[in-house]
Image (tube, rainbow, N blue to C red):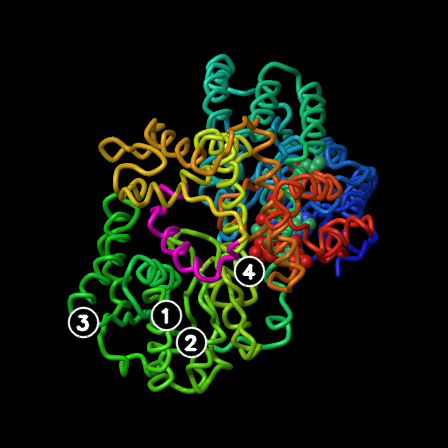
């Protein structure tokens, strides 16, 4: 699909009078692979050599100008010419070079534009330096040229946030010289070049610009260091970006460039780069599922949500935000009012923060209808059920949907663990029934598990993926089992955490170790946030099917029996005096833990943070391997995306399966085998993990290898 191209096919030159038009045409996004770099360098040499050329226009074919370096090349040996050389050749040309930006000008793409002498934008242009999202820094002069053009604060913010600017904002920031209406970059670009030539516009090099008020800028950068260290929580490249900008202020341009290159290479070598780039590609791979590739989605122009609780309201907001009309069904007038209030609350908050006008809120709410009558949803294209998590209640809803909905309507359940095959079987149209497992708050959380029951039609699966795109969710295809991908794996590593707790680690040590790894919160903090009663209900439900020989830790039950359900009750594993969000350690909890250990005859031992994480991660990876082995997840990357998008797994580690690959599968397996000596029932090596180790392979070999 992305076959290696030769320079003359991806970069073409054509003389338009005395203007050499250099077109970058490397689908899908004109990334700066080796052939493009060679082509651009050759084009600059041609422009220099040809006396008939008086100016050069750089233009991107297709939707993008240039979306940056070719990310797939990172981690492989660099191929000449490297991009900084290409940018130097552009900037050094003795004839005016103009870049016309009509779409994405990102990363190396913007750096190419910054090396040009003039920049023109069309309204659809987006300009950004998003390298930080990949664990990198702009490595082709971006850290040296952007501060010269737009000032230190604006440039540093652009690089640290990775957020692109729209054309108008880029104009105001000084990144582009002119903004014109239109969608034809060639015509607009040529007109601009003519204008410049008519005005005798000189060659104007960004490198020659001085940075305003360097002392004040240096002081500001110093302040940013501490702030950035705190905000970026262990990320490597943000502080390196600041170092580069300092170099731009303190060193001559060429030395600044050398410093940037050295720090860029440090970023390239960092494991965070590998993790973040894995996450980038994995998020694009997850949508490539067999059904979505084989079938056309059904049209979805209207949605119904059954149930107006927190989850139903969040789903309704997600659909409203995507521009869809939503009908919410509830049991009675009171519940309708509550459902509506839950939806309105979200928009109220936006208005209060000044992020939405009253008129915009009224327009959104105009697409929302509450009703107690299922007949009102007879014509909707897709229904999402979000009622109480009880199979009989859900089946009753689905029988009702089966009765009223038009043929071909997609009927989705938001259950997080119930058997969707059984729910589908309660209708006369199991081919239309699918799982759409949103995560709370559903209008915010990115992950959407698309759960595929046995009888569902492929075009219903395709419809679900299309809907996810519309709702700006990250969809992951999951098979039917208790907990699907995410909650099933969570149940296992949570158990590992409980064993650690009973064996001697305090909940506070475990949480600290997990945070130290890069999660925003540890498992006991998560329990307190979600409400301890939720897990308690699940444990009670599972009690009947639990293997009596399996180890069961009762500490959480002891906490729940006291009514300590976490933040909402003011205490759980932590104390939350007067609604504080940050919990405080609780000696009474530690006493409960001690009493439980004594009851079981456990002599507590100490665990280092590393020992804690080895168990926590081994449990996560092993169950992840089981989930792939059983086909619940299509590929290891689906597990990775689930955890990064829905469970706070540190993105810079790529996901649990990527972490395992980087740690080395033999090491992970050896750990599991060692732990199995203590508890062979819990620590059973996954057959897939054993097989991969035996064959000397890794999880990534099961992902679509040709993409990397
Ligand atoms: C950099 O530039 C470093 C330099 O500073 C220094 C160098 C020395 N490379 O997202 P989409 C593929 S770092 C290779 O679905 P959209 C993508 O995998 C780079 N491939 O489309 C997908 O492939 P497939 C800084 C890339 O319309 C296809 O293109 N730049 C690259 O939703 C379509 O992508 C960035 O970080 C790439 N750079 O969004 C920008 N980009 O079809 C990264 C995309 O096989 N890119 N692909 O699955 C983006 O943010 C979005 O792709 C973009 C388009 C906004 C451009």
The residue that disc 4 covers is 476
Are the two marked residues, 3 and 1, in contact with CB atoms closer than 8 angstroms? Answer: no
Secondary structure type for disc 1: strand
What is the spatial separation of the Cα atoms under label 3 and label 1, in whole angstroms? 16 Å
Which one is earlier in the sequence, the residue at label 3 or at label 1?
3
What is the spatial separation of the Cα atoms under label 2 and label 4, in whole angstroms? 18 Å
Q: Looking at the image, which is closer to me, 445 or 564?
A: 564
What is the spatial separation of the Cα atoms under label 2 and label 1, in whole angstroms? 8 Å
Secondary structure type for disc 2: strand
- Mark 4: few, some, or many residues within 10 Å (few <14, many ≥20)? many
Q: Residue at x 58, y 27 (%)?
A: 241
Which one is earlier in the sequence, the residue at label 1 or at label 4?
1
- Mark 2: few, some, or many residues within 10 Å (few <14, many ≥20)? many
What is the spatial separation of the Cα atoms under label 3 and label 4, in whole angstroms? 34 Å
Secondary structure type for disc 4: strand
Q: Residue at x 50, y 30 (%)?
A: 504
In-image side of 18 versus 397 (left or right): right
Q: Is residue 155 visible?
A: no
Are the two marked residues, 2 and 1, in contact with CB atoms closer than 8 angstroms? Answer: yes
The residue that disc 1 covers is 385
Q: Please say whether residue 334 is one of the residues in the magenta stretch.
A: no
Q: Quadrant of the N terminus?
A: bottom right
Q: Please say whether residue 542 is one of the residues in the magenta stretch.
A: yes
The residue that disc 2 covers is 411
* Magenta highlight range: 526-548
């Amino acid at each position: 699909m992305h076959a290696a191209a030769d320079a003359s096919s991806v970069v073409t030159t054509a003389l338009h009078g005395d203007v050499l038009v250099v077109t970058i045409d490397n689908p899908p996004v004109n990334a700066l692979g080796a052939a493009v770099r060679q082509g651009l360098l050759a084009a600059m040499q041609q422009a220099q050599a040809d006396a008939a050329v008086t100016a050069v226009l750089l233009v991107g074919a297709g939707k993008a100008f240039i979306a940056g370096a070719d990310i797939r090349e990172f981690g492989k040996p660099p191929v000449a010419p490297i991009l900084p050389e290409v940018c130097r050749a552009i900037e050094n040309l003795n004839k005016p070079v103009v870049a016309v930006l009509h779409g994405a000008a990102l990363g190396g793409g913007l750096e190419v534009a910054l090396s040009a002498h003039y920049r023109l934008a069309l309204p659809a242009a987006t300009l950004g330096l998003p390298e930080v999202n990949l664990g990198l820094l702009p490595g082709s002069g971006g850290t040296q040229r952007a501060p010269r053009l737009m000032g230190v604060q604006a440039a540093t913010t652009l690089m640290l946030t990775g957020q692109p600017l729209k054309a108008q904002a880029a104009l105001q920031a000084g990144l582009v010289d002119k903004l014109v209406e239109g969608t034809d970059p060639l015509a607009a670009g040529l007109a601009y070049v003519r204008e410049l030539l008519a005005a005798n516009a000189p060659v104007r090099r960004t490198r020659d610009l001085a940075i305003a008020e360097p002392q004040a800028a240096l002081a500001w950068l110093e302040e940013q260091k501490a702030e950035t260290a705190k905000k970026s929580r262990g990320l490597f490249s943000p502080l390196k970006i600041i170092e580069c900008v300092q170099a731009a202020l303190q060193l001559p341009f060429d030395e600044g460039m050398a410093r940037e290159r050295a720090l860029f290479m440090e970023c390239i070598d960092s494991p965070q780069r590998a993790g973040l780039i894995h996450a980038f590609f994995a998020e694009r791979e997850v949508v490539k599922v067999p059904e979505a590739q084989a079938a056309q989605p059904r049209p979805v122009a209207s949605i119904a949500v059954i149930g107006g609780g927190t989850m139903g309201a969040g789903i309704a907001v997600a659909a409203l935000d995507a521009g869809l009309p939503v009908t919410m069904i509830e049991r009675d007038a009171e519940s309708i009012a509550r459902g509506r209030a839950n939806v309105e609350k979200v928009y109220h908050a936006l208005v209060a923060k000044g992020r939405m006008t009253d008129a915009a809120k009224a327009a959104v709410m105009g697409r929302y209808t509450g009703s107690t009558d299922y007949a009102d949803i007879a014509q909707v294209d897709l229904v999402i059920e979000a009622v109480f998590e009880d199979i009989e209640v859900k089946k009753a809803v689905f029988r009702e949907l089966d009765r009223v909905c038009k043929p071909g309507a997609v009927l989705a359940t938001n259950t997080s663990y119930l058997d969707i095959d059984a729910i589908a079987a309660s209708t006369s149209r199991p081919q239309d029934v699918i799982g759409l497992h949103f995560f709370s708050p559903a209008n915010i959380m990115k992950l959407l598990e698309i759960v595929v029951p046995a009888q569902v039609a492929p075009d219903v699966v395709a419809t679900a993926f299309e809907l996810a795109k519309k709702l700006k969710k990250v969809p992951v295809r999951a098979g039917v089992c208790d907990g699907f991908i995410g909650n099933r794996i969570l149940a296992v590593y949570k158990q590992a955490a409980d064993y650690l707790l009973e064996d001697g680690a305090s909940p506070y040590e475990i949480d600290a170790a997990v945070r130290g790894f890069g999660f925003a919160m540890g498992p006991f903090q998560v329990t307190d946030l979600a409400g301890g009663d939720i897990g308690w209900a699940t444990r009670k439900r599972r009690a009947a099917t639990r293997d009596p020989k399996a180890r069961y830790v009762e500490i959480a039950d002891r906490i729940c029996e006291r009514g300590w359900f976490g933040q909402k009750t003011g205490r759980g594993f932590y104390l939350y005096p007067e609604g504080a969000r940050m919990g405080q350690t609780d000696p009474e909890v530690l006493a409960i833990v001690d009493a439980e250990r004594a009851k079981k005859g456990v002599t507590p031992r100490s665990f280092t943070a590393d020992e804690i994480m080895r168990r926590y991660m081994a449990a996560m990876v092993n169950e992840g391997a089981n989930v792939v082995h059983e086909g619940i997840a299509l590929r290891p990357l689906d597990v990775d995306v689930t955890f990064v998008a829905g469970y706070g797994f540190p993105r810079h580690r790529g996901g649990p399966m990527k972490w395992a690959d980087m740690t080395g599968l033999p090491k992970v397996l050896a750990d599991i085998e060692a732990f199995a000596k203590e508890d062979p029932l819990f620590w059973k090596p996954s057959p897939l993990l054993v097989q991969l180790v035996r064959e000397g392979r890794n999880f990534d070999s099961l992902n679509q290898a040709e993409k990397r």
